[in-house]
């Protein structure tokens, strides 16, 4: 019998996220566990009476339906005894007994991976950061891992795809489940140039319990997890907690300290997560660890610089600036200096936070140190940094040497 049938039997009987590590060390494999029989199960002391009863309810031969469904749909089955099974998942006490894979299963073996998670109801700011960050990291060779949901997850996958990079979507339901139909096209794109994976049986539905389970897989696949725009009770904080428990690196993008949408991410920074002000803040941690997979494509560019290069910031594109300059020269006037005394204030985006507006008012064309800006704006350093990052993303401020910022 196909060894995969025994692993599917183990998944079906004990369920996903069962504590399998000790069992596999004792019995060697799912086949070894099955062939040992109930007497040895009891003698091992590793299984409860309820688990022993569950193991007898099915047999590996009943895995034929799952094997058939996977073959018909082109889904691969990757199990812990396969060379394609990620080593980082083997470290988990509750490692997945089966990974169902739609796409390129070899991407699971890439060492340079980064998990990117955040709210489903992301703001324009959160989506911009996610898109710019993942596009830059993917261009540098990193595989972007996320959950395939709306909001930050979708922006993370799309950023990696736009860069021509690899991305992995970890689902909280079976591959054959008609979940989140509006993201069906995105999942197909991911499968074409990366992988969509699940530890759940092909037609297992999504539920309130499946998403927290899949979060441990997202964080375990990558050596580092980046949290973007997470509220106080965001599910992304479960992924962050898993990352910390697994000994992974934890990063967070600072946000508006007044908005509850950023409370979770800001608290992670307070508690020791590395703040992310540019893609290099993440990439620099892994360039030396994975030199064969990574290169420094994004350089030291800030999010503001990346945004302007992307053309998303239409108010600050070279075309817009040239048009403004031509008009003022035609009128015989010098182009306005947004930092000059008495100059007309720049029209700021409606979505800009109050903190960002306050910091913008004390910015000038001459660069000012972050400490000076913090004092002049009357804001704590962390709040000032978050506001400056927001201003960068909207093309209103620019980071210069020595942690100094200037108005643009």
Image: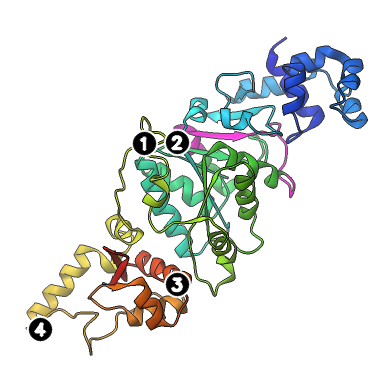
Q: Is residue 368 visible?
A: yes
Residue 141 location in percent, x, y? 38, 37
Q: Residues within 10 Å of mark 1 (few under 14, many from 20)?
A: many
Residue in the image at 68% along x and 18% along y = 4
**Magenta segment includes 212:** no
Residue 17 left/right relative to 147: right
The numbered dot on residue 353 is: none
Q: Quadrant of the C terminus?
A: bottom left
SS of the residue under disc 2: loop
Residue in the image at 89% along x and 25% along y = 52
Q: Where does label 2 land, which residue?
A: 112
Residue in the image at 37% along x and 70% along y = 391
The stretch in magenta equals 188-209
Q: Residues within 10 Å of mark 3 (few under 14, many from 20)?
A: some
Q: Where does label 3 land, which residue?
A: 381
Q: Where does label 4 land, which residue?
A: 333
Q: Distance of mark 4 from mark 2, alpha carbons?
A: 52 Å
SS of the residue under disc 4: loop
Residue 242 left/right relative to 224: right
Residue 114 left/right relative to 132: right
SS of the residue under disc 3: helix
**Magenta segment includes 208:** yes
Asked whether disc 2 touches disc 1, contact meaning CB atoms under 8 Å apart, the reply is yes
Q: How many marks?
A: 4
The numbered dot on residue 294 is: 1
Query: Which callout, 1 or 4, points at the residue further toward the start of the chain?
Result: 1
User: From this viewpoint, which residue is outermost toward the top?
Assistant: 1
Q: Foreground residue, 43 or 65?
A: 43
């Amino acid at each position: 019998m196909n060894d995969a049938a025994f692993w599917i039997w183990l998944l079906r009987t004990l369920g996903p996220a069962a504590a399998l590590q000790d069992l596999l060390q004792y019995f060697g494999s799912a086949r070894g566990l099955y062939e040992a029989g109930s007497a040895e199960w009891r003698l091992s002391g590793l299984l409860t009476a309820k688990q022993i009863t569950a193991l007898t309810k099915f047999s590996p031969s009943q895995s034929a339906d799952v094997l058939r469904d996977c073959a018909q749909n082109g889904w691969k089955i990757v199990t812990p005894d396969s060379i394609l099974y990620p080593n980082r998942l083997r470290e988990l006490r509750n490692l997945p007994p089966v990974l169902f894979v739609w796409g390129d299963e070899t991407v699971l073996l890439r060492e340079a991976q980064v998990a990117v998670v955040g709210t489903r109801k992301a703001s324009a700011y959160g989506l911009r950061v996610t898109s710019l960050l993942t596009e830059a990291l993917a261009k540098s060779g990193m595989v972007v891992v996320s959950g395939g949901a709306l909001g930050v997850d979708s922006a993370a996958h799309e950023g990696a795809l736009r860069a021509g990079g690899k991305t992995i979507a970890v689902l909280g339901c079976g591959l054959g489940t008609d979940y989140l139909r509006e993201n069906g096209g995105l999942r197909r794109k991911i499968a074409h140039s990366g992988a969509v994976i699940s530890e759940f049986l092909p037609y297992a539905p999504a539920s309130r319990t499946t998403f927290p389970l899949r979060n441990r897989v997202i964080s375990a696949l990558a050596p580092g997890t980046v949290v973007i725009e997470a509220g106080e009770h965001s599910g992304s904080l479960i992924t962050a907690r898993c990352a910390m428990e697994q000994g992974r690196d934890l990063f967070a993008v600072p946000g508006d300290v007044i908005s509850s949408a950023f409370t979770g991410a800001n608290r992670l920074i307070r508690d020791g997560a590395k703040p992310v002000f540019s893609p290099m803040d993440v990439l620099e941690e892994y360039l030396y660890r994975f030199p064969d997979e990574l290169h420094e494509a994004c350089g030291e560019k800030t999010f503001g610089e990346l945004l302007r290069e992307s053309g998303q910031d239409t108010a600050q594109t070279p075309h817009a600036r040239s048009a403004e300059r031509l008009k003022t020269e035609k009128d015989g006037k010098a182009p306005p200096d947004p930092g000059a005394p008495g100059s007309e204030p720049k029209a700021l985006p409606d979505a800009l936070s109050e903190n960002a507006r306050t910091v913008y008012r004390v910015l000038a064309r001459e660069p000012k140190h972050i400490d000076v800006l913090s004092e002049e704006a009357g804001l704590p350093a962390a709040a000032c940094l978050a506001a400056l990052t927001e201003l960068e993303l909207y093309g209103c401020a620019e980071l210069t040497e020595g942690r100094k910022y200037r108005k643009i």
